[in-house]
Amino acid sequence: SQLRVAVSLNNNTIELYTLDVSNTNNVAHAEVTFLRSISTHGHHSEVRSVAFSSDNLAIVSGSGDQVKMWNRPSLACLHTVDTSYVLSVMFVPGDRHVLAGCKDGQLLIIDIAV
């Protein structure tokens, strides 16, 4: 099977990988392939959470002061929302909204369909 993995680094870069996992004779094998890196127009503080849209065409990332929406194929930043300290982000089913959970207890609902 194949997994897509987004890794947030301490230099505010997000790297995308595929992980091909196979099982032969009860021994797991994994092949990791680097796909790309998002570093331009990135966050100004450490990225704490990353999520993919259900169609894998968009990425949302949350940091200490912002939520950013990215176009995965072009790596362009589509939208930035200034926030308090973000701990987690996720797309709501349907990919029209993003939820962001903040350290101060706020739950932000961000309309990305606009």
Image (cartoon, grey):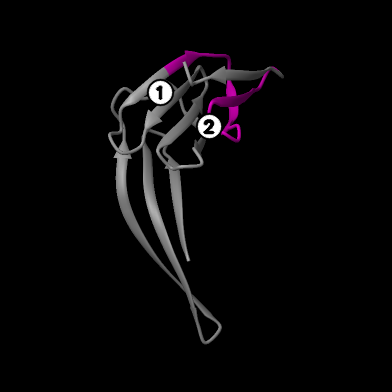
In the rendered image, residue 61 lying in the magenta stretch gets the answer no
Residue 111: x, y in percent?
54, 18
Disc 1: CA contacts within 10 A as few (<14), some (14-19) or many (>=20):
many
Task: Give the number of callouts.
Answer: 2
Q: Is residue 80 placed above or below 52 in the rendered structure?
A: above
The residues tagged by marks 1 and 2 sit, at their Cα atoms, a distance apart of 22 Å
Q: Viewer-proximal residue, 24 or 114?
A: 114
Disc ID at residue 103 = none
* 90 to the left or right of 114: right
Q: Viewer-proximal residue, 68 or 113?
A: 113
Q: Disc 2 on helix, strand or loop?
A: loop
Taking the view exactly as shown, the residue that stands out farthest to the bottom is 25
Rendered residue at 52%/21% (across/down): 64
Magenta stretch mostly in which secondary structure? Answer: strand
Rendered residue at 51%/27% (across/down): 62
Q: Amino acid at mark 2?
A: Asp
Taking the view exactly as shown, the residue that stands out farthest to the top is 82
Residue position for label 1: 43
Rendered residue at 33%/58% (across/down): 33
* Start-end of magenta stretch: 80-104
Residue 1: x, y in percent?
48, 66
Q: Amino acid at mark 1?
A: His
In the rendered image, residue 88 lying in the magenta stretch gets the answer yes
Residue position for label 2: 95
Q: Is residue 80 placed above or below 70 in the rendered structure?
A: above
Residue 68: x, y in percent?
44, 23
Q: Are marks 1 and 2 in contact (CB under 8 Å)?
A: no
Query: First in sequence: mark 1 or mark 2?
Result: 1
Q: Disc 1 on helix, strand or loop?
A: loop
Q: Is residue 20 placed above or below 10 in the rendered structure?
A: below
Disc 2: CA contacts within 10 A as few (<14), some (14-19) or many (>=20):
some
Residue 35: x, y in percent?
31, 50
